[in-house]
Image (spheres, grey):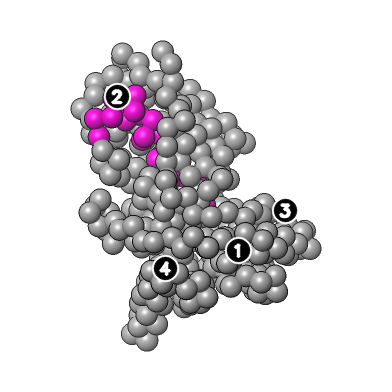
Amino acid sequence: MSFVRAYAPATIANLGVGFDILGMAIRGAGDVVDVALRPDPGVNLLSVSGDDGRLPRETERNTATVAAAAVLRLAGADMGLDVHLLKGLPLNSGLGSSAASAVAAAIATNACLGEPLQREELLPACLEAEAIVSGWHADNIAPSLLGGIRLIAGTEADQIHELPAPDQLHLALVTPEVDVPTRLAREVLPTHVTLAQMVAQTSAAARLVAALYTGDLATLAQAMEADGVVEPARSSLMPKLPEARLATRGAGGLGLFISGAGPTLCAVCESEALARDVEAALGAVYQEAGIPCQARATQVDPAGARLL
Ligand code: HSE
């Protein structure tokens, strides 16, 4: 039987100050999943490539197969599936790798079944998969599935709101080759914040949303950098964060924040040319430190996951 192939993009969660409530899909990097229906029940993970053998092959521990099985269940389908996962995203890098695998598998499975579920109805299946590796949060899942920049006010579809993505918003990313498992990056977070921290954090998150509406990139970057709770707790896990911030400014970028749980860092730029300059400057920071890295310039992906 022929396979259905789907692609789901990388995502940048938190956008600095919006821990677990903001996320955006980005162009140019993502995971691909092929699925084919079988008449007998059960989900088989037939192959995984691009992960250097690091991802679990057990179907109940791999986010692609967990999401695929959940879609079969939600759709009331009694057949089985063969799944191939082609990883385009590095693991534990802060680019929503586990979410992209889940989302690609969910939309491929739904397409195989003749699309019994609407796009938003795939959200619980993807969340179930994400929860097995990094907890119950949708700030990677929602933008990968739906595209664009999303406010994730809850995990129900009607609590996920699209925010405007300014046309002139360009991003420069750098991913140093350092593993930062999301579970570890969540364990270092404080369980309580002061009232003053709460006021500063909510004010910055509100400023960020307002700046998306006005398209004011300088204010946007300033708000993204104003995280006084999560970044300080995680900074020891992010090599060369202060140097990367200085290099961003030096190359004409407006600001830099940790992408998701890190170690990828994301710089805000106001043109493609500046994003290329910042990409080079960020790459140089890690080269000088002897840390292999991948740097790229990109933009928001407005479409999200799609069939190929
Ligand atoms: N909001 C999540 C975090 C994203 O920062 O822990 C990582 O999956």
**Which residue is label 2 attached to?**
113
Give the quadrant of residue 40.
Answer: top left
Amino acid marked by disc 4: Leu
Q: Residue at x 58, y 37 (%)?
A: 51
**Which residue is label 3 attached to?**
292
- Evaluate whether residue 65 shows in this view: no
Is the N terminus in the top left, top right, bottom left or bottom right quadrant? top left
Q: Which residues are magenta?
A: 95-117
**Which residue is label 1 attached to?**
271
Q: CA distance from mark 3 to mark 2?
A: 42 Å
Q: Are marks 4 and 3 in contact (CB under 8 Å)?
A: no
**Which residue is label 4 attached to?**
212
Amino acid marked by disc 1: Ser
- Give neighbour class at mark 2: few <14, some 14-19, many 20+ (Cα, 10 Å): some
Q: Earlier in the sequence, mark 1 or mark 2?
A: 2
Q: CA distance from mark 1 to mark 2?
A: 42 Å
